C-alpha cells in the first residue's frame, strides 16, 4: 500500500465526516529554533492578566466587589489558568517525527587500518518526544 493510497483513504474518510483537512507546511528547523528561543514560556499570571483585560473590554468588572469581597469571576479564571498551565507543563507531551533520509549520521573512530569516518542517514521514520515549558 503506497503513501498516496493511505492519504486518499484518510481524505475520503474525512470528506465523509464533512471535515476539512488543513495542509501543514513544514517550517525550517532554524526558524523553529529562533522562534522558540524568543518565546517567554507559559505564565499563569500573564494569562490571567490578559483575560482580565479582555473581560474589562467586555464591560465585566475584574476588581474587588463593591462590598470589598473578592471578585469570584477573577478567582474562577485564576483557578482555570492554574489547572491549564499545570496540565500543559506536567501532563502534556509533544510528539513529532523525522522522515526517512532527513537525519544525517556521522561517526569517527579507528581500526587496524587507521582512522576512519562513516556517514549515513536514517532509513526509518524516527519518533520524537518533548515537553511543554
Image (spheres, grey):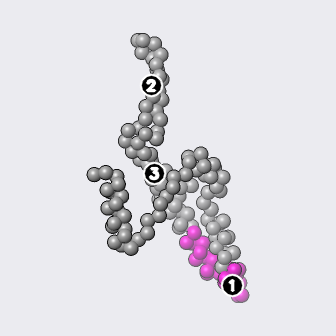
Q: Earlier in the sequence, mark 1 or mark 3?
A: 1
Q: From the top left corner, tell me how far across and down residue 74 is, in percent.
A: 63, 77
Part of the protein shown in magenta: 56-81
**How many dots with numbers?**
3
**Residue picked out by circle 3:** 96
Q: Residue at x 47, y 22 (%)?
A: 117
User: Farthest residue in the bottom direction?
Assistant: 67
Q: Earlier in the sequence, mark 1 or mark 2?
A: 1
Q: Earlier in the sequence, mark 2 or mark 3?
A: 3
Above-or-below relation of 83 to 114: below
Viewport quadrant of the C terminus:
bottom right
Q: Which mark is residue 111?
A: none
- Secondary structure found at label 2: strand
Q: Residues within 10 Å of mark 3 (few under 14, many from 20)?
A: few
Q: Which mark is residue 59?
A: 1
Q: CA distance from mark 2 to mark 3?
A: 27 Å
Q: From the top left corner, tell me how far across and down residue 121 is, in percent.
A: 43, 35
Q: Can you see residue 70?
A: no
Amino acid at each position: 500500500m503506497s503513501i498516496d493510497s493511505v492519504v486518499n483513504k484518510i481524505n475520503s474518510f474525512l470528506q465523509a465526516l464533512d471535515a476539512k483537512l488543513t495542509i501543514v507546511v513544514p517550517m525550517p528547523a532554524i526558524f523553529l529554533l529562533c522562534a522558540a528561543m524568543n518565546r517567554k514560556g507559559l505564565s499563569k499570571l500573564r494569562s490571567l492578566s490578559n483575560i482580565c483585560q479582555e473581560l474589562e473590554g467586555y464591560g465585566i468588572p475584574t476588581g474587588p466587589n463593591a462590598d470589598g469581597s473578592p471578585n469570584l469571576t477573577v478567582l474562577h479564571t485564576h483557578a482555570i489558568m492554574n489547572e491549564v498551565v499545570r496540565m500543559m507543563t506536567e501532563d502534556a507531551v509533544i510528539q513529532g517525527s523525522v522522515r526517512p533520509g532527513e537525519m544525517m549520521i556521522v561517526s569517527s573512530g579507528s581500526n587496524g587500518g587507521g582512522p576512519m569516518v562513516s556517514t549515513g542517514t536514517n532509513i526509518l521514520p524516527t519518533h520524537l518526544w518533548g515537553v511543554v515549558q
